[in-house]
Image (cartoon, rainbow, N blue to C red):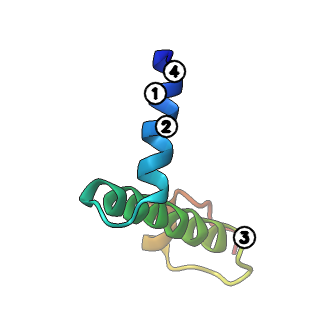
Amino acid sequence: MSSIMLLRKTIAFYLEDLSTPVGQAVDIIITGLILISSAIFVAEFSHFPMPFGYSLIFWIPQYC
C-alpha cells in the first residue's frame, strides 16, 4: 500500500471517528473554524453600523 493511501485512510479515520481524543479535537477545530468564518461573514456584510472597536478587530472599514 502506498504512503498516500495510508495517509488518506488515517485522515478519514480521524474525520469519521468521535471516540478518540484526536477525532474529537479535529471536530472541535473544524466547528470552531466554521463559527469564526460565519461570524466574520455576518460582521462584514451586515448593514448596521458597527462600533469602531469591532471594526478594528475584524479589519472592516467604516461605511457610516
- The residue that mark 3 highlights is 45
What residue is rendered at 46% in x and 17% in y? 3
- What's under tag 4, amino acid-wise? Ile
The residue mark sitting in front, 3 or 2, is: 2
Quadrant where the C terminus sits is bottom right
- The residue that mark 1 highlights is 6
Disc 1 on helix, strand or loop? helix
Q: Are marks 2 and 1 in contact (CB under 8 Å)?
A: yes
Q: Do the residues labelled 4 and 1 touch (CB within 8 Å)?
A: yes
- What's under tag 1, amino acid-wise? Leu
For the residue pair 14 and 46, the one nearer the viewer reads as: 14
Residue 20 percent across, percent down from the top left: 28, 60
What residue is rendered at 36% in x and 57% in y? 23
Crowd around label 3: few <14 · some 14–19 · many ≥20 (10 Å): few
- What's under tag 2, amino acid-wise? Lys
What residue is rendered at 54% in x and 64% in y? 34
